[in-house]
Amino acid sequence: MSDLQTFREETRDWLESNCPPEMRKPGDVCWGGRNPAFSHPDQEVWLERMGDKGWTCPMWPSEYGGGGLTHEENKVLQEEMFSMGARPALASFGIWMLGPALLEFASHEQKLEHIPSIVKGKIWWCQGYSEPGSGSDLASLSTKAVEDGDNYKINGQKIWTSNANYADMIFCLVRTGPQEPKHDGISFLLIDMDQPGVEVKPIKLISGKSPFCETFFTDASAPKSNLIGEINKGWTIAKRLLQHERSMISGMGLATGAGSGPRKTSGMAELGKRYVGTDEKNRLDDAQLRTKIAKHDLNSRAFTLTLQRMAEDAKTGGPSATASMGKYYGSEQNKLRYEIMLQAMGTSGLGWEGEPFAPEELAITREWLRSKANSIEGGTSEINLNVISKRVLDLPD
């Protein structure tokens, strides 16, 4: 028996013994934090067990609390979780964005301080990049961090800080070199959100939800030990982190299972059959809608293979500029998916609240509205197309 097969059997046995029944059903995923909110007692148990095992971050070094798995072992873990319908134990910007950047740029002491808490979901992180006047031109940001003894004093404003109203800490781009060229005066700083100098205001979207916020710093403080990398060299870290963010966003256009891998259906065909009806061959009665769903499904399958190829290429050095390809296409696929779902629902997709609309119908309508932000967050489609042309296709400016 091969070592990988032995690992598969041991992983299957561990999951069978440790994954609580409720976590084998579809549902929400915990975001952790200093004051975590669990929708079910099993969620807390699952997070604790997976965190102790390091399998919330299975390929991170075991030295810092990660699982220490190889790419092949992690693939086995994801396959076994998907096979039993196990939900991820933790959702976190710390896992998707900050952690990989810390592993690459932070000191050993900083890794020991921050990585284990990410693995175990002890801190809810948010991202402080964009500002009201510095969105697409991110490097023009003006939030300042000035030396103040052993600390930095921070003043300025960030916008579109997802879940900042729940977050414990923020990884933030700040200007520490006001005289340097704009790309050379930026630093990467970790700031505690629970202090008098930080104010957060949610921004309500057209979907009626408020995942985004405005964040204001007024003489907020952060210790100098929370500066990641060299002072005025944060732009390098910022670009790298954006590649991780775009890789994370890439999968939004795919219907994925609780563990890993595509579902058998994205839900569009079922909606079509429910609202449009079927013909004598049990196919969607609307041929045009049927074609759209089939084309979307085929493109999603091809996109899945592209993402797998990109992941293989990233094994040694992490994500590259090709992450912009995944982010751009994933955004468009997700927006198109909700457009098709809304078309299938017809007038049932016009509801906002209350009867006669079902909760699922109302949720799809709101998610359709929310999906419009996909081509803005994580770098606009235009920005990503520029990255693709310059960094992937090597086209002239």
Image (tube, helix red, strand yellow):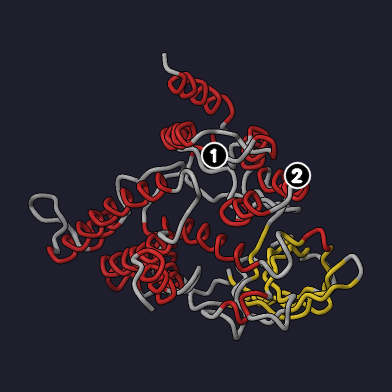
Residue extending furthest toward the right: 149
Asked whether residue 355 appears in the rendered view, the answer is: no
| Nearest to viewer (mark 1 / mark 2) | 2
Q: Where does the image place residue 43, in percent across and percent down from the top left?
A: 62, 42
Q: Nearer the viewer, residue 151 or 8?
A: 151
Residue extending furthest toward the top: 1
Q: Where does the image place residue 220, in percent across and percent down from the top left?
A: 82, 73
Count of picture labels: 2
Instruction: In the rendered structure, find residue 112 and report the number of the disc placed on it.
Output: 2
Q: Is residue 347 left or right of residue 243?
A: left
Instruction: In the rendered structure, find residue 76 and report the number of the disc placed on it.
Output: none
Q: Is residue 279 left or right of residue 314?
A: left
Which quadrant, please, contains the C terminus? bottom left
Tell me where residue 332 sits by quadrant: bottom left
Cα distance in 3D space between marks 1 and 2:
30 Å
Residue type at tag 2: Leu
Instruction: In the rendered structure, find residue 23 and report the number of the disc placed on it.
Output: 1
Which quadrant, please, contains the N terminus? top left
**What SS does tag 2 mark?**
helix
**What SS does tag 1 mark?**
helix
Tell me where residue 228 sits by quadrant: bottom right
Residue type at tag 1: Met
Q: Where does the image place residue 290, in percent across and percent down from the top left?
A: 17, 60
Task: Identify the residue at image location x=37%, y=59%.
Answer: 253
Task: Identify the residue at image location x=7%, y=52%.
Answer: 280
